[in-house]
Amino acid sequence: MEIVKAEGPITGEQIAEKLNLTRATLRPDLAILTMSGLLDARPRVGYFYSGKSTNQLLGEQIRKLYVKDYKSRPVVVYEETSVYDAICTIFLEDVGSLFVVKKAGYLSGVVSRKDLLKATMGKQDLTSIPVGIVMSRMPNIVTCTLEDTLYHAAKLMMRAQVDSLPVVRPFSEDPAQLEVIGRITKTTITKVFVELGENMTL
């Protein structure tokens, strides 16, 4: 990198000569630096420094990751589902929140662990209370779409202070309503962040 910064454009043979290496030995390293975006290469010209920092390149990489490639299966209950059954579902599915839909299938709300915990306070019969009473309702639900970036989804989660977002699209029978087709969670974002860190060569 220092050689290219100081003397670029410079050929692979010239770099190898300065390092007392063969061109073949150096080829994989040059390929990695070029693929990562830190160096640019032009035929019959050579290698030159792209001028981009590792942080800039990481930012560009993050903005190329889309919700459609990382969404997971949504866990859905109906408005009429009892709080008791919702509590069972949230623990059996090991999720932080449930997306609530109407019988027609479109999104009507979200119920979180905190919502369900509040509902257990007191001496109510949890089997007789529907989640529709304790959930957060549309249009106060933050959502994302398949074409959103993970970066955008992460910003939405931070702004709304929620652990997950429903991935939605217009409902086929009524485009004014939203159909839940997936979910993006903080865990998803964290896994992607860890994978990026493990794959970074520089």
Image: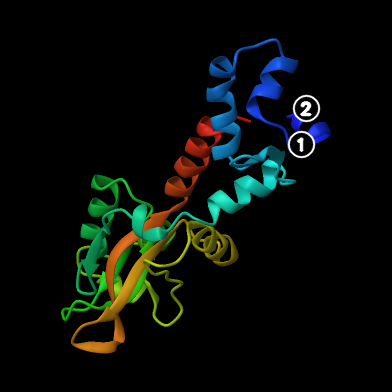
Residue 5 coordinates in the image, percent (x, y): 79, 35
Residue at 60% across, 13% down: 22
Q: Quadrant of the N terminus?
A: top right
Label 2 SS: helix
Viewed as shown, does residue 4 lie left or right of 115?
A: right
Toward the right, the furthest residue is 6
Q: Are marks 2 and 1 in contact (CB under 8 Å)?
A: yes
> Is 176 placed above or below 40 here?
below
Identify the mark nearer the N-term, 2 or 1.
2
Residue beneath label 1, please? 8
Residue beneath label 2, please? 3
Residue type indicated by callout 1: Gly
Viewed as shown, does residue 73 lie left or right of 184?
A: left
Mark 2 vs mark 1, CA separation in Å: 7 Å
Viewed as shown, does residue 192 lie left or right of 127?
A: right
Closest to the observer, 152 or 14:
14
Label 1 SS: loop
Residue at 40% across, 67% down: 147
Residue 166 coordinates in the image, percent (x, y): 36, 65
The picture quadrant where one finds residue 112 is: bottom left
Residue type indicated by callout 2: Ile
Residue at 45% across, 66% down: 148
Please say whether residue 118 is visible from this viewpoint.
no
Residue at 56% across, 15% down: 25
> Is 157 placed above or below 48 here?
below
Q: How many residues crowd around disc 2 within 10 Å: few (fewer than 14), some, or many (20 or more)?
A: some
Please say whether residue 10 is visible from this viewpoint.
yes
